[in-house]
Amino acid sequence: MRGVCKTYRFFMLNDVDLDLPAGHIMGFIGPNGAGKSTTIRILLGLIHQDRGDVQVLGHRMPSEEVAAKWDIGFASEDMRLYEVMTLGWHMRFIASIYPAWDRTYAETLLERFGLVPEQKVRGLSHGQRVKAGLLLILARRPRLLVLDEPTTGLDPVARHEILRELVAVVRDEGRSVLFSSHHTQDIEQISDQITFIDRGRIIDSMDKESYLDRWRRVRMEVPSGTRLPTLPGIVKLQQNGRLAIATASAFQPDLPVAYESAGARVQRIETMTLEEIFVAKVEQSREEEATA
Amino acid sequence: MYLQIMEQIKQRIAVGDWREGDPIPSIRQLAADIEVSVITVKRAYLELEREGVIVTQHGKGSRVAAGTELGARLHEEELESLLDQVTRLAALMGLEPSELAERLGSTAGQHSPTKRRKGKKAS
Amino acid sequence: MNSLIPALIRKDLQMTWVFPVLAVATGCGALALFWFGSQPVSISGMVAFFIVLVMLGVTPNVLIMNERKKQTLAFVMSLPVSGSQYALAKLAAAFGMFFVPWLLLIALALLLIVSTSEMPNGVIPLFFALALLPLIGFLVTTSVAIVAESDTWSNVTMGAVNISYSFVWISVMAVPGLLADVGSPVPVWNETILTALGIEFGVIATIFGSTLYLQSRKRDFI
């Protein structure tokens, strides 16, 4: 995606740039209402962007949406199957459309997910419906999977089952996955790349390891009367009596040295989980907007 | 997370599951097996190669490095790191090195091979 | 890569075939009343018949509105179809669901009219013109259901169309040229009738065309 913009009455998507190379998994995170679903739907041609270029699997969207959708598998949280029909009916329906339907893999997934084809969709629990929807996508082996919150509302076992299948997809270097989730642990665990969106803007998009590497939490003991300097790359500085915590988004080894020379004693330098980074980043983003 | 992966691989080499020259799973294969991102495994492999634990040949995959006494070396590294941690903690607690040595001696005596065998029989 | 339209049509028909079957059955029942009953019963049979036709115009819309309400639209649009293809498939399915029973019932009714001497065959052109009205009403409600994205619009249209039937029929009956040749034993296709039919077909084509056009211009599907 390049320079994609979309304006709605109460919300605007601005200058979205996104790149996902083949064989990778991209985790898409952002607060509610940030624009994840909109961006995802633009990728699928379900929403037409006001401005900007979108290319998926070599096809321009939305003009070539039909060609592209032959190779894309899409599932979203608010998508529903036909309640009165059985899972088996849905499987036959999809199999009749997509020549790449892998019957053996479908049977394996039925077993792994604990699903029964003779069951009507309306009799399935929420978790089973999500798994059913994913089965319908996975079994036809699309080159790209675009999933909007595939693990939301699922119990840990079901989440595990799904993550396992998603990682199995990129065993093939030619296939990729893009998924959004509120479960930052899931994103942290299986994503190769992380994209952060907030209020209609991409605020970060890069490979996961480098991203996690740039963030650190520095815990210090500060003798009374010592003023800690403002250093570049520090997102937040909390001081509680004699203890201080600095959150760094661009950590350099000379950072703790700078604090020590100002009189503080560095107790620990911790890496941060994606969830902590997420919260810190959004806070920073909001502050910058407020002062701008 | 990549550190954990490195640890696991080192462990398997140290106990002898993978011997020198044995192939280890491809990056993508391992990623799928343990359900983590490819990039994390990639990083772990890169670090391991830097440390000389594994060797990667382009197009042929990775294998355990042919270095003498690799297992022993890894044990040595682990011992060093743990000793480092113990001494730091002791310093924080205000223990003198001689006190620490005493504690170490008695603990080591408890875990001697003879004691261990007796313990196992009881369970 | 084949177009998905046949598969989509088949899917819709698979899920809703009960409706047209029921409609045909009820319509036949109404015709039976008309055929076998004496005066008041036979008239009510005729009325019932037209009511069935009107109802036939309503049920396919349930199918379409449900797709949006029950959120299966996302599922369908994730398949390799464009918005216009989807609309075409829906129109075709709904049309099939309406058209086949409608045609069947019309044919049966015409058969009955022709084979009885009680009803002069001059009625036929008028009957035809009147029978086309449910078809138009159906098309209007269906296209609104496809193109407009809210239940409100669909419901309003349906209500308006149903109410308008009585008005339109009465006003149609009031046109002198139409009733002129009703009494004749042979169907007469006079100018007024032909014009009326022409207008009706024109309206049908316009609705089809504008639905597809409006749907292709849509920029947000979900």
Image (tube, rainbow, N blue to C red):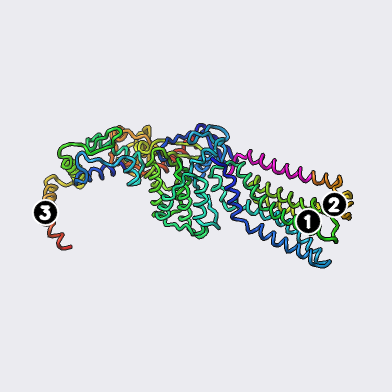
Residue type for callout 3: Pro
**Residue A265 visible in the snapshot:** yes
Q: Which residue is mark 2?
A: C187
Pointer 2 chain: C
Q: Position of residue B22 (x, y in %)?
A: 22, 41
Where does the magenta region start and end?
A: C199-222
Is there CB contact under 8 Å for labels 1 and 3?
A: no
Q: Which residue is mark 3?
A: B113
Near-viewer residue (B72 or C63): C63
Q: Earlier in the sequence, mark 2 or mark 1?
A: 1
Q: Position of residue C50 (x, y in %)?
A: 76, 58
**Residue C203 shown in magenta:** yes
Q: Secondary structure at mark 1?
A: helix
**Same chain, marks 2 and 1?**
yes
**Residue C153 visible in the snapshot:** no
> For the stretch drawn in magenta, what is the main secondary structure?
helix
Q: Which residue is mark 1?
A: C110
